[in-house]
Structures are given as C-alpha cells and as structure tokens.
Amino acid sequence: MGVQAVVDRRSKLSPFPKEWPEWLAQDSRWHSVQRMVASRHFARSALLSKFLLYIVAETIEGRQSEITEHQIGVRVFERAPSYRTVEDNIVRNYARQLRRRLADYYQNEGASEPLRIEVPVGGYAPIFLPASAKVPAEEDQQLPAVIDPQSEPTNSAAPHRGVAALLRSRWRWLLLGPLLILAYSAALVGITWYTALRFHARPHASTSTAPLWAAIFNNSTTSYIVPADAGFNLLEDVSQHPMPLANYMEGGYLNLPLPSLDAHSAGDLRTQQFTSFVDLQIVTSLERLPEFNPQHVMLRFPRDVHLEDLKNANVVILGSEGSNPWAAIAESNANFRIVDQGEMKGAVVVNSNPRPGEASFYMSHWNEPAHETFAVIEYLPNLAGTGRLLLLQGLDVAGTQAAAETLLHPSAIATILRRATRPDGSLRFFEILLRSTSIQSNAMATQVIASRIY
C-alpha cells in the first residue's frame, strides 16, 4: 500500500486534514515517517499510522508540549473532549503497540533508514536519532528526551546536533538522578510520617467486617468508589434548585441559574470536580484495607458514573442524594432512606417500616454549630443483583463521617455484622441507622439506633 493510500485512509478522521501542509514534504523526518506508514509493518493498521503521523507532525511543527494522552485520544481516536484518560487507556495501549512496531520496522524493512524515530516510554512526543546512534535503553526512555525543533534545521544532517544535546542532557540526569532519588525518598519518608500522625492507623482486618470488604473489593469484579460532588451541592444551595438524578445525569447542573456569582466562579462550580475532605479521608482509609486491590478498584467522580456501573460492578457511594445523586437510585428499595424535604430545608431519614420504639423519620438541625445528626450504612445488591452496593451517607458531612468511622472501626456494630454473617462466611444484606453529634461538622459519640438484616 502506498503513502497516498495511507493518507486517504487517514482523511476519514475529522481531526486530520485531507492533505498535510506542503512544507512538511521538505523535512527529512516527514519523508522517513511517510516511508514507514507505507511499509507492511504499518500499512494494515490505520490507527497506528494515524497515531504516528500525528505525533511526528506536531513535533516538526514545534508543538511537543501539546502531545498529551488526552489530546491524542481526542484527535487520533475521536474521543469526546470530556473523556477521562484514567478510565480509557486506548492511547496507552496503542503507544505500547507503536513502540513494538517501530522496533520491528527498524530490524526489518527500515534497517537501512538513515534516521530512527523513537517514542520514549513515559511520554508520546517522538525523538529522532541517526541510525548510527545508540537506541535508547528502556530505563533511559523514562527520562525527558525531546529535541528542541527550533535548534534543528530540516535537512538530513539536522538530528546530529539535537542528539548531542540529548546525550549531554541524559548524562546530567544520570549524574543528578541518585541525588534526586535521595531527596525524593527523604520527602516521601517525611510525608509518610506526617500522614501516620495526622490520620488514624491502617485499619486492620476485622473478623466482623472481613466478609464485607471481601465482597466489595473481590478480585473478579470491578469496584468503584464514588465520593460526593461537593460542587453540585453548592450549585443546588446557591441556585435554590434541588436537582433529581435524571436531570443530573443529563448535565442539568450546567444550566442552574447562579445570579449571585461572577461568571468565573459559576464556571468553576459547574465544571470542576470538587469533593469534601471527609470523603478524601474515607477513600484513603479504604485504600489501606488489606482487601483493597488497586488493580480492580477505580475512583470515579459522580458526574462520570453511568447507570450500567450500578448494574455491572460493586460500588461504594459516599454522601446522600443532595451531594451524590446516585444514592437515590441505589437506596430506592431500602428501609432507611435519606429524603430531601424540598425548598432547600435540608433532608430527613425516612423509616419506611418503623418497629416498636422507632420513629418514622429522623431530622437534624443542621444549621446549628452543635447538633444531633443521623447517618445510614447500607449494604445492598446492585441494580442487576450481580454485585454489591455500599452506601455511607448522612444528613450532613458529619453524618457521612460517622458512617465511615463506624464501619472502619466496627466495635459498635460487631454484633449486627456477626448476625448478618452466614455459616459459609458470606454476608447478608443489611442497613444500619446511626445517631451522632456534630460539632463544627465533626462526628462525635456515634450510636446505633436501628438496623435491618435481610
């Protein structure tokens, strides 16, 4: 397949021009990449060819700083501008394939090429080396290695001066590397020591909670941790317009009226991913659990959650409907439900089927500095019954904190969890209603006041 055929295939993707700028044809690096994409190593892979053509063209035009994983995803793989690289690894996967394909090409068809193109590991901007230069080793490729295009003429001798500067730069890195590693290690030790003092110690595996964490963080199913959307909560408060899940899923928060805010602040609230410090502490504690497996657990912001996630995965939801709308659908069939009172009057815990001694609802005076608050821990099936949902939510931030602390240090609920544990060690679904005292948004003296085991 010829070069023109590759260009014709490439033109199907809107981010690419049907014809590249004519001046590119005067650059030896562009000649090299054109021969490469016409070779058998690339001719049958349109996406790899597009990937390579894009990063080389951007580099020749002096835009190495714009060659990012996100930008490649949008311009080469037609991902939406809002897509998140932490959830979609298509660029990283293709980059690995591209590096292997480049190595194969230079060992076979490209063995006589006067110029080598390398894509260093840890980045996506290519470097150009004369064929006689040593191929960068894997460990070298972890270092920044981009040749300044402003210092390179566009003739075939251009790479030599750039390579010399590159090699000098790498020697400086090799000499300074150990010192930087020592400094980094010292800083890391300091941070670790501070964190150990500031936050509670690593939660130990408890016999009462072990079945719960084993089910939530099992290695056969993806698990999501979904913290609260604090920005959405503020949008509701400022606009005086509570928003149900259906509107939230459609991005309705982007259109809430915010007449009291300037355009910049309003834009930040509508688009930025804000969460609470309490939720950060909870996520940190969950990550330190022995059952936590980072290969199967993902942190996902509520605005990026999809309905299918609550059907196909295990999900930990932090916060109630006002700050995490997904809690509403997750607890739709629960006995204890946190329900907004409307007109921005706060929320109450509704007890659908009160037992003797229980109230039908529980309300918090959330606008007082020190007040009684309530929280719910719910362990329920996901929407398809194929996984588990764990909800930690309160009438305010202190309530959510109380729910998490009770579950992470479960002495207060050990009896309930033992009753919920089956003979085979698995756990029945359950709900626990808690009462706590909120002092300046910090939970104190938390107690269990009701529970259900299914």
Image (tube, grey):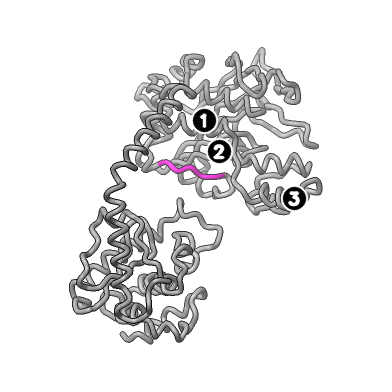
From the viewer's perspective, tell me whether residue 103 is left or right of residue 78: left
- Helix, strand or loop under label 1: helix
- Helix, strand or loop under label 3: loop
Q: Amino acid at mark 2?
A: Pro
Residue at image position (27%, 48%) is 175
- Asked whether the viewer can see residue 43, the reply is no
Label 1 belongs to which residue? 281
Disc 3 to disc 2: CB gap under 8 Å: no
Looking at the rendered image, the quarter that the N terminus falls into is bottom left
Distance from Cα at disc 2 to Cα at disc 1: 11 Å
Question: Badge 1: few (under 14), some or many (20 or more) residues near its Cα, within 10 Å?
Answer: some
Q: Amino acid at mark 1?
A: Gln
Residue at image position (34%, 35%) is 185
* x then y, percent, for residue 344: 77, 36
From the viewer's perspective, tell me whether residue 423 is left or right of residue 281: left
Tag shown at residue 256? 3
